[in-house]
Image: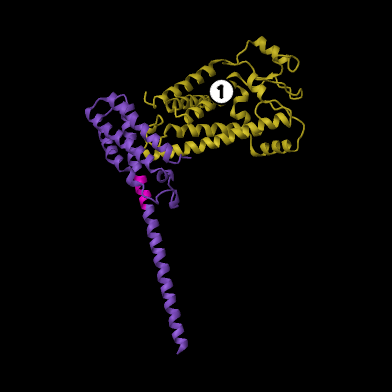
Chain colours: A yellow, B purple
Amino acid sequence: MTDERAPDESATDESATGRRGRGSGVKVWDAPTRWVHILIIVLIGLAWWTESHDEMDWHIRIGCALLGVVVFRLAWGVVGGVTARFTSFVRGPRTVLAYATKLVRGGASEDVFGHNPMGGWSVLALLGVMAADIGFGLFCVDVDGLESGPLADRVSFQAGRAAAHWHTVLFKALLALIALHLCAIAFYAIVRRENLIGPMLTGRKRLAATVGQPGLQSRSPIPFWATAAIAAGIALWAAYGFRI
Amino acid sequence: MAGRLGGMKRGWRTAIFVATASAVVVVASAAAADVVSVIQARQTHYKEIGKAAKAMSEQLKSPTPALPVIQAAVKQIDALAPQVPSWFPPGSGPEAGVKTQAKAEIWAKPDEFKRDSAAFAEAAHKLDLIAAGGDLSAIRAQAQVMGQTCKTCHEAFRQRDD
């Protein structure tokens, strides 16, 4: 799961920037960031499917797993690889506007190491709406008062119904953000001829030589395992109604 | 003279018109107020059922279920369930212009609605009897049966939330 590599291997990678066939380019996304992305796609799909097929026990378990993944990603935004860190990709409005202007004017394709200034806000919005939606999900009660989230017994029936309403509203907001996200990927692929999906799967991206990034460096595995253990613990704890 | 008579006639006509119009407005708004209170009462009753069902299912999921809580909740559901058909007088559907999730199908398919609500009342009564016995696994099984009657009826006759 971690992006740890032997020092000699990463040295090879850096020197081979843009020159090798397989694994060409520099490393831009560490393994935990990529796995979080894949897990989020799979878990949101499963959460949607189980809810629409009335498999509420599974829907709740999946929601708790997703809670763990989101908690992990938020923590990884502090202790993770450089490109995963919020401080590296959350940029001010002026930078975002400047980037958007350049994008609209169809300026020369520019390779960004990590999230671009607009994509950074997309990440924050997606994670924020997901976190809030999961938060409401914990307190949901269905209309019959029979199915309920792991924290629903702490609130009244009315409050649980209100939580269910907001859970639905935020899911729609999340779908809208996902649609926007896919449109942005399509825009980069079609208009700018930039493949964003490949790097998110392999972790590697061929950057313009002028950028001259060395790529992600090898790191200690301790932050990963510590964060993963805490996130898994929170997911399990949620599944048991925060009762242990 | 003739002018005064004409004026009086006009006065009468105006008075009759005003009286009729106000009567129509009063009756219509009284009817509307009645529909509003019918729908509100219905929603209050359903929320009582939901609250009781929530209390019951929380105990059934708990590692240490409190039987008296379950029995009280189930008794309340059993008392309300047979009243369900009476909460849906004609005119209290979507056409009332008040926010309600009651579908027009309730009045379009009265036999099916009667059957579904009767199934709920029957399941609730049976659950009440079983709960009095205190056998938790039997209560859980019958609670599932009753929950299914909620879902069946809601699927056909209640607008989904959004």
Q: Is residue A149 magenta?
A: no
**To which residue does mark 1 refer?**
A36
Which is more toward the observer, A195 or B152? B152
Residue type (three-letter) at the residue carrying disc 1: Val
Residue A116 visible in the shown view:
no
Q: Does the magenta stretch mainly form a helix, a strand or a loop? A: helix
x and y, in percent, of residue A32 in the image: 57, 20
Q: Is residue A31 left or right of residue B13?
A: right
Q: Quadrant of the N terminus of chain A?
A: top right
Q: Given the current orientation, which residue lies at the most extreme bottom position?
A: B1
Q: Where does residue A210 sit, x and y in percent of width and height?
A: 76, 24
Q: Mark 1 falls on what kind of element? A: helix
Against A165, residue A3 (above or below) is above
Q: What is the chain letter for disc 1? A: A
Residue B154 in the image, given as x and y percentages of width and height: 41, 38
Foreground residue among B25 and B90: B90
Point out the stretch of residues depicted in magenta: B37-44
